[in-house]
Amino acid sequence: MLLESYQLEIFNSKCMPGSFGVHCFAHLDQDISEAIPYLNASLGGFTFTKEPVSVTFKIQGKLLTVHPQKIAVNALKDEVEARKIVEWLKREINEAWEKRDSITPSYEAMPQPKMMEILKLLPKTNCKECGEPTCMVFATRVVEGAKGYEDCPQLNSDNKERLKNYLGKFNLDF
C-alpha cells in the first residue's frame, strides 16, 4: 500500500466566506508522485500537469486535484462528504499503484464530453424542469459533471440511452 494515511483539513472559501459549501485538503503522509501517472491512466484526468506533477478530475460538479503530498477537493457539503471522497481517492491511488505493472502510465489529459454532442440529444424545449434556465446550460452542467442524463425529465427513452452511453465513457463515481 502506497498511501496509508493523511490529515484532513476542512475550510470555507476565502473568496466566498459566507458560502455554505466547504473545501478540503488531505495532507498526505506519504509521497505519491510516482503513482499519479498511473492514477491518471486508470481514472482519466481532466487535466494533467507534468511539472510539478498533478492530476485534476471533474466529478459530480467537484474538482479533485491530486498532488504528490496533497489532495484538494472543492464544493463539498460537509466533512462527511470530504472523508468519503478522500477515502475513495485513497483506494483508487493504492489500486492504481498495486496494478502499475499492467497499467501504461498516462502523462496527458483524457478526452472530455462535448457540450454540443450532449445538446444534440436533449429535447431543446428549455422547460426548466431540470433546474437550469435552458437546455444549453443543462448540457454545460453535464460537461462539468454537475448534472447527469437522468436529470432531464423530458428526455425520451432513446436519447436517454444514447446520452447514458455517450457519458459512460467519461463519468466516474465514488
Image (cartoon, rainbow, N blue to C red):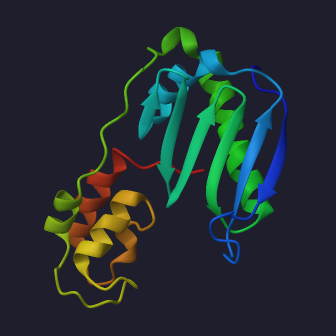
Question: Residue 118 lies in what quarter of the image?
Answer: bottom left
For image coordinates 17% across by 79% down, the residue present is 123
Question: Is the residue 121 above or below the residue 19 in the image?
Answer: above
Residues 152 and 116: in front is 116
Question: Relative to 41, is 114 on the left or the right?
Answer: left
Question: Is the residue 122 above or below the residue 13 in the image?
Answer: below
Question: Relative to 9, is 81 on the left or the right?
Answer: left
- Check the picture and name the quadrant holding the N terminus: top right
Question: Is the residue 129 above or below the residue 1 in the image?
Answer: below
For image coordinates 32% across by 89% down, the residue present is 128
Give the percent coordinates (x, y) of residue 25: 73, 46
Residues 156 and 77: in front is 77
Give the percent coordinates (x, y) of residue 65: 58, 41
For image coordinates 51% across by 40% down, the residue present is 56
Give the percent coordinates (x, y) of residue 12: 73, 65
Give the percent coordinates (x, y) of residue 172: 48, 48
For image coordinates 46% across by 16% down, the residue present is 105
Question: Is the residue 33 above or below the residue 130 in the image?
Answer: above
Name, please, the residue furthest toward the front.
Answer: 15
Question: Relative to 79, is 119 on the left or the right?
Answer: left
Residues 44 and 103: in front is 44
Name, please, the residue furthest toward the left.
Answer: 120
Question: Residue 94 lies in what quarter of the image?
Answer: top right
Q: How many marks?
A: 0
Question: Residue 131 lies in what quarter of the image?
Answer: bottom left
